[in-house]
Image (tube, rainbow, N blue to C red):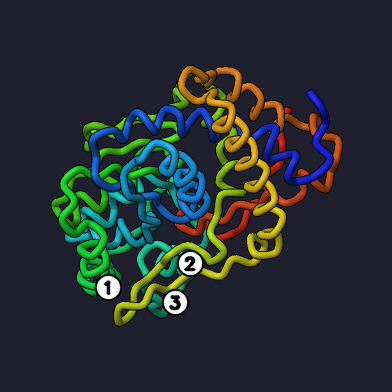
Amino acid sequence: MRSPKSFEDLGYIYFGPLLFNFFVWLKREVNGCDKILFNSREGFFLEQMYKMFQEKYQLPESVYFKTSRKLSSMAACFTREDIYKTFELHRYSGHLSNLLRDRFGICPKVEHDYVLDTHITTPFLDNYIDEILDKAKYLRNEYSTYISSIVANSKDIVMVDSGYQGTTQYYIQKAYGLTFKGRYFTFKGNEYLKNVSGFYDFKTTMLPKNIIFFESVFIDNVGSYIDIVNGQFVNEKLEEQVQFFEEKKEIVLGAQRFIKDMLENNIDIEYNSATYSDYLFSLMCTKDFIKNVELMDIFYHDNYYTRDSIKKVIAKD
């Protein structure tokens, strides 16, 4: 195995096989459906790669679907219990004021702000319930217009995302009474969802613990969708993510080149080595395996739904 000399090399060697095997599997899984939703932000580049298969195999129509855990969970908040239930699926670590803003979309005056961790205790939010539910109702109505335009007359829709729990799918189905199929890179499980699966097995592959590297690269050139005001989507600011977006585009270009090489050589029908591609990607994520520090210094991950800081992704032993 040659050592990567560039970001494009990094994409070709380590991301390419991971993605190619996923799309070979997805090609079979979407057979018979009439629309594929590639959830933002991973879907920004994923849909581009899907079109390489779509063109060759006449696969179903695809849509880059504007969504996020914040938009979908807020749309699904009808009651006090719905608000507190968001902590069952996703923890939060950070200041109370940031939690109210980043998860629930409100900015009230907080007299006694403090740092919390919902792994330790659930915050008391009863003073803010009415404001949160009012915001949720407004957002639910705004989002409904967009979702209706995307779903249109489609009857068999597949939602594609990186994983783990199909949270966005669950919340949108709950909020709008819709039913999707879910196809994920890796799927931990969700008792509320049916017809959902992941390609890289959650228990036996290494991808679940390394997927933060993947999600750091597969981003949009705008931040997460956090609100809709008068029909216009609102995004978070990206900060470090924007700083390295051009380098990440080069990684994606390398992965696309790998896929192109495989398709041109008609290796896609039988080539399905999930174990090997998972192993390759795990090597990249291992401390000091990639000697070129500059290639490994662009991985940042923002997730304001669960914490109020941006995390630099570090390879582990």
The residues tagged by marks 3 and 2 sit, at their Cα atoms, a distance apart of: 13 Å
- From this view, report whether residue 308 is shown above or below residue 301: below
Q: Which residue is mark 3?
A: 111
Q: Which residue is mark 2?
A: 98
Badge 3 vs badge 2, beta-carbon distance below 8 Å: no
> What residue do we see at 49% from left, 55% from top?
44
The crowd level at tag 3 (other Cα within 10 Å; few <14, some 14-19, many 20+) is few
Count of numbered circles in the view:
3
What is the secondary structure assignment of the residue under circle 3? loop
Quadrant assignment, res 139: bottom left
Q: Can residue 117 be seen here?
A: no
* Residue 268, position as x, y percentages in the image: 50, 25
Q: Can residue 155 be seen here?
A: yes
The residues tagged by marks 2 and 1 sit, at their Cα atoms, a distance apart of: 16 Å
Q: Which mark is residue 135?
A: 1
The residues tagged by marks 1 and 3 sit, at their Cα atoms, a distance apart of: 21 Å
Tag 3: amino acid = Glu
Mark 3 or mark 2: which is in front?
2
| Left or right of residue 17: residue 97 | left
Tag 1: amino acid = Lys
What is the secondary structure assignment of the residue under circle 1? helix
What is the secondary structure assignment of the residue under circle 2? helix
